[in-house]
Image: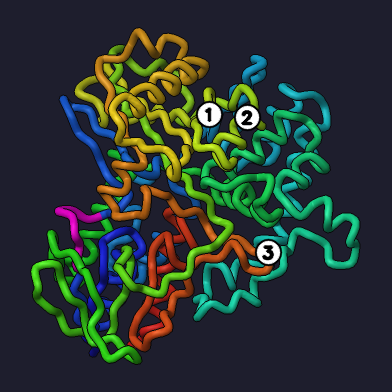
């Protein structure tokens, strides 16, 4: 069996480590920080607990497969997996709002028709039916097959865009083009574009194939893990330990060892070396030949963790999306040439029904998150983060009317914190890989140009997000084999 060094302990790296160790390899994980999980972090204070990364899970089958393939206990044996229903509430600046059930097409049609007028639900469902074709065309090459080298040919064409109707192809080449042509109602357009913004993509340039993301959510549902999503990282870490993976914390990898044609190990910041037959990179290392899509924009996340007095009211929706006052202004602020932040962005408010996150039932842990610029905005400058957090809390009042009066204290996390925690350049957060536009929305291949080097995690195929990161671990384990 081979000696394998895994760089970093994010979810993709942990998934790879657990799978590789299960097949008999000797696996050592080098993590520069003092804990595991990468971006899937936790902040605790005064009896409150908050996720500092993803707050929900789509496509739990990825982690079900991981637990089945690496031990006796299933995912459900290892964590408290809960279906989130309703899935989301949408609130718009003009007062329009609606709540959508989880994984219920009929329920979604009814809710949209009631809020936006007859036919609205059918237009949204028709879009998802067409998005199924994207899922069927890209499921294997995007989620079940490694992307080797930098050849994007298998995913260069956008399966949502018809090849034989050039006039339609031009109009539907982007997500915004699809939204305006097929959905028409401004609220439906905003609802579709929010999927792009959630992952830091400009819907005006993102490929139409991005419709696969709402399809996945509608088909496989939205899930939460009791105690917070950090519990998933803890469970995967525990599985690694059960499989005898060795963890070295405070061990920053600064170089790769080898003769240029094959890696033979890694060098650490303290001057020590670890020999290896394979190196699996799940974190940035100077000099690595990682391919980063030119289409990916320089965005991260600003999150406000709010310890609120007062109980969570019965019937409160877990996730609310508060849409921007003016979408064009928001997009220009995020993706334009001038380094500014939006006055009132689209934001997400998470209010889990989970007493494990609070000191008692008279308090509530609330998380408010928005996608923000990283390049050109210095989030470390005193006052910048707090000023922007004030805007987010004010805007979140549309979802939690008495929020400002309920705040006991708050913690603000910006791209600067993400960079410090994960090592991500400028604190950027990678989005999932997408088909189309000549392969310009793909991430690094899973096999490096140097023999023995492999890539996992959000910056590698198939991109960011909990399901995609978990799949990257499976793909690399398959490449290395037994």
Cβ atoms at labels 3 and 1 below 8 Å apart: no
Across and down, in percent, residue 409 comes to 25, 19
Q: Circle 2 sits on which residue? A: 329
Q: Which residue is mark 1?
A: 342
The picture places residue 89, in percent across and down from the top left corner, at 56, 27
Could you tell which of marks 3 and 1 lies nearer the N-terminus?
1
Q: Camera-side residue: 140 or 430?
A: 430
Q: Nearer the viewer, residue 451 or 141?
A: 451
Q: Badge 1 local density, few (<14 within 10 Å), some, or many (20+)? A: many
Numbered disc 1: secondary structure: loop
Q: How far is mark 1 from mark 2, CA to CA?
A: 7 Å
* Image position of 472 (left or right of 42): right
Q: Which residue is label 3 attached to?
A: 436
Q: Is residue 1 above or below residue 390?
A: below
Q: Judge from the rendering whether residue 302 lies leftward or rightward of residue 22; answer left or right.
A: right
Secondary structure type for disc 3 = loop
> Alpha carbon of mark 3 to alpha carbon of mark 1: how far?
29 Å
Determine whether, in the image, residue 179 is placed left or right of residue 361: right
Depth check, mark 3 against mark 1: the one in front is 1
Find out whether the residues at labels 1 and 2 contact each other: C-beta distance under 8 Å: yes
Residue 325 appears at what percent x and percent y? Answer: 61, 22
Give the quarter of the image for residue 452.
bottom left
Q: Does label 1 or label 2 sit earlier along the sequence? A: 2
> Splitting the image into 4 quarters, where does residue 267 fall?
bottom left
Q: In this orientation, does residue 401 appear?
A: yes
């Amino acid at each position: 069996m081979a000696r394998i060094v895994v760089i970093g302990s994010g979810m993709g790296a942990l998934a790879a480590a657990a799978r590789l160790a299960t097949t008999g390899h000797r696996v050592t994980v080098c993590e520069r920080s003092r804990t595991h999980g990468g971006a899937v972090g936790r902040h605790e204070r005064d009896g409150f607990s908050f996720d500092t990364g993803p707050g929900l899970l789509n496509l739990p089958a990825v982690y079900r497969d991981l637990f089945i393939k690496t031990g006796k206990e299933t995912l459900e044996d290892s964590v408290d997996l809960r279906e989130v229903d309703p899935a989301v509430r949408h609130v718009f600046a003009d007062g329009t709002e609606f709540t959508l059930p989880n994984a219920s097409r009929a329920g979604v049609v009814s809710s949209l028709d009631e809020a936006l007028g007859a036919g609205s639900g059918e237009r949204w469902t028709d879009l998802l039916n067409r998005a199924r074709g994207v899922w069927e065309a890209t499921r294997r090459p995007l989620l079940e097959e490694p992307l080797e080298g930098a050849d994007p040919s298998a995913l260069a064409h956008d399966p949502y865009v018809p090849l034989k109707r050039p006039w339609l192809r031009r109009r539907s080449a982007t997500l915004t083009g699809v939204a305006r042509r097929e959905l028409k109602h401004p609220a439906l357009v905003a609802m579709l574009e929010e999927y792009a913004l959630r992952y830091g993509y400009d819907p005006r340039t993102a490929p139409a194939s991005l419709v696969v993301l709402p399809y996945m959510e509608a088909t496989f549902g939205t899930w939460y893990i009791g105690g917070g999503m950090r519990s998933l990282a803890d469970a995967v870490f525990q599985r690694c330990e059960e499989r005898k993976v060795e963890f070295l914390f405070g061990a920053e990898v600064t170089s790769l060892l080898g003769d240029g044609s094959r890696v033979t190990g890694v060098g650490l910041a303290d001057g020590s070396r670890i020999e290896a037959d394979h190196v699996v990179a799940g974190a940035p290392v100077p000099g690595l030949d990682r391919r980063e899509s030119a289409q990916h924009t320089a965005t991260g996340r600003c999150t406000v963790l709010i310890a609120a007095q007062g109980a969570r009211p019965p019937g409160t929706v877990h996730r609310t999306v508060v849409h921007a006052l003016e979408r064009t202004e928001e997009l220009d602020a995020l993706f334009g040439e001038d380094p500014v932040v939006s006055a009132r962005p689209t934001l997400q408010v998470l209010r889990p029904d989970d007493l494990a996150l609070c000191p008692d039932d008279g308090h509530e842990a609330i998380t408010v998150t928005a996608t923000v610029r990283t390049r050109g905005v210095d989030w470390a400058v005193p006052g910048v983060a707090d000023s922007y957090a004030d805007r987010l809390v004010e805007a979140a009042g549309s979802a939690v009317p008495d929020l400002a009066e309920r705040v006991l204290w708050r913690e603000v996390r910006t791209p600067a914190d993400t960079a410090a925690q994960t090592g991500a350049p400028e604190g950027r957060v990678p989005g999932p890989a997408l088909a189309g536009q000549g392969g310009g929305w793909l991430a690094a291949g899973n096999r490096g140009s140097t023999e023995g080097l492999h890539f996992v995690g959000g910056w590698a195929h198939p991109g960011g997000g909990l399901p995609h990161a978990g799949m990257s671990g499976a793909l690399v384990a398959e490449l290395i084999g037994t």
